[in-house]
Image (cartoon, rainbow, N blue to C red):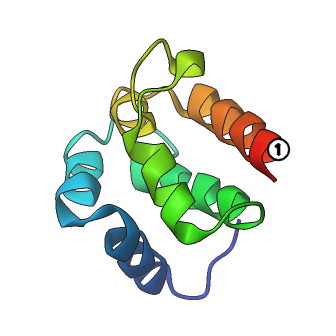
């Protein structure tokens, strides 16, 4: 997905999840084409289409059954990008 200003997107993510959470995603970035912060932003956009920002922010910090009890932030830091995307879509659809 093309973004005009990725810095603004990251600032929005930091406003919702906090600096510590976003810094943790940057620190855990595995080598590859995608970074955890980029995936988190993509999932956030999906969630924002279905729930308010407060609920979306809570989702990132709560353990999820679909992620084997990990939070989406933990799963993203571990490189489970597709699993987090799938969990986010399923959760949003169930709460929309």
User: Is residue 66 at least partly visible in the picture?
Assistant: yes
Residue 21 shown left or right of residue 11 in the figure: left
Q: Residue at x 25, y 53 (%)?
A: 21
Instruction: Choose top left, top right, bottom left or bottom right for residue 41.
Output: bottom right
Residue 71 lies, with reference to residue 41, above or below; the image says above
Residue 30 lies, with reference to residue 70, above or below; the image says below
Q: Residue at x 39, y 22 (%)?
A: 70
User: Observer-nearest residue: 54 or 13?
Assistant: 54
Residue 93's x, y, as percent? 82, 44
Give SS at disc 1. Answer: helix
Mark 1 crowdedness (10 Å alpha carbons): few <14, some 14-19, many ≥20? some
Q: Which residue is mark 1?
A: 93
Residue 32's x, y, as percent? 45, 38
Residue 89's x, y, as percent? 75, 41
Q: Residue at x 35, y 26 (%)?
A: 78
Q: Residue furthest top?
A: 68
Residue 64's x, y, as percent? 51, 25
């Amino acid at each position: 997905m093309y973004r005009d200003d990725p810095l603004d997107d990251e600032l929005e993510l930091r406003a919702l999840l906090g600096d510590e959470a976003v810094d943790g995603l940057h620190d855990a970035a595995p080598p590859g084409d995608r970074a955890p912060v980029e995936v988190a932003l993509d999932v956030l956009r999906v969630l924002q289409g279905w729930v308010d920002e407060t609920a979306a922010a809570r989702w990132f910090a709560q353990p999820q059954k679909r992620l084997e009890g990990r939070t989406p932030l933990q799963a993203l830091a571990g490189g489970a990008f597709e699993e987090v995307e799938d969990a986010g879509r399923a959760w949003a659809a169930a709460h929309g």
